[in-house]
Image: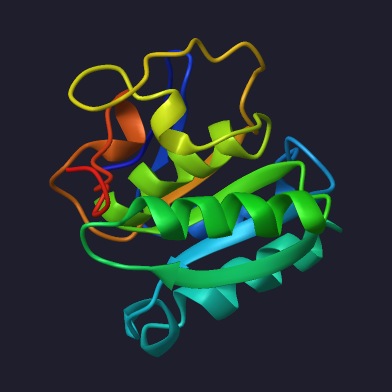
Amino acid sequence: MKFNFNNPTNLYFGSGSLNQLGSLTMPGKKALVLISNGKSTKINSYLDRTLSQLDEAKTEYIVFDQIMENPVKEVIMEGAAKAKENACDFIVALGGGAVIDSASAIAAMATHNGDLWDYVVGGTGRCQPLVNKGLPIVAIATTSGTGSEMNGFGVISNLENP
């Protein structure tokens, strides 16, 4: 099965879809490429293929490989700082739900000051509104199950203030 779904997420699905990335218009000139701190994207050559496609698209990138299962606030803040200090103007999230959830939070914090928990609604969050647009995200799902690439929710833990 192959299809293209755009609502407003532009979803490419099917065998070989990653090979189209280099021919697509990127939402910026320099990407923060997020991957997990595990080995699967490297062992399965997804990272090499993605970076090759970004090269084909004449897009610069920095790789941030610190995302863990059940991501924590500190790693989100570290990723946002890396995006800011390297002038990244979009994010490529290569992985499963944890990586894609982290991409949403990093995209928001790369364009806002303060702490992630300043903007969290509910629980111990401070409920401040996000006033700036986050960085655009290109999500390349390597697993299926959570639907993180298609929804507006994410799971990030705050170990300091659960």
Q: For the point 57% across and 36% down, which residue is it?
A: 109
Q: Is residue 161 left or right of residue 9?
A: left
Above or below 45: residue 148:
above
Q: Nearer the viewer, residue 108 or 4?
A: 108
Q: For the point 32% across and 55% down, which residue is it?
A: 72
Q: Nearer the viewer, residue 94 or 105?
A: 105
Q: Is residue 71 left or right of residue 63?
A: left
Q: For the point 21% across and 57% down, which residue is it?
A: 70
Q: Residue furthest left?
A: 145
Q: Where's residue 133, x and y in %? A: 64, 19
Q: Where's residue 155, x and y in %? A: 23, 41
Q: For the point 62% across and 11% down, which residue is it?
A: 131
Q: Where's residue 19, x and y in %? A: 57, 60
Q: Is residue 9 left or right of residue 121?
A: right
Q: Quadrant of residue 75?
A: bottom left
Q: Is residue 22 visible?
A: no
Above or below 74: residue 35:
below
Q: Quadrant of residue 51?
A: bottom right
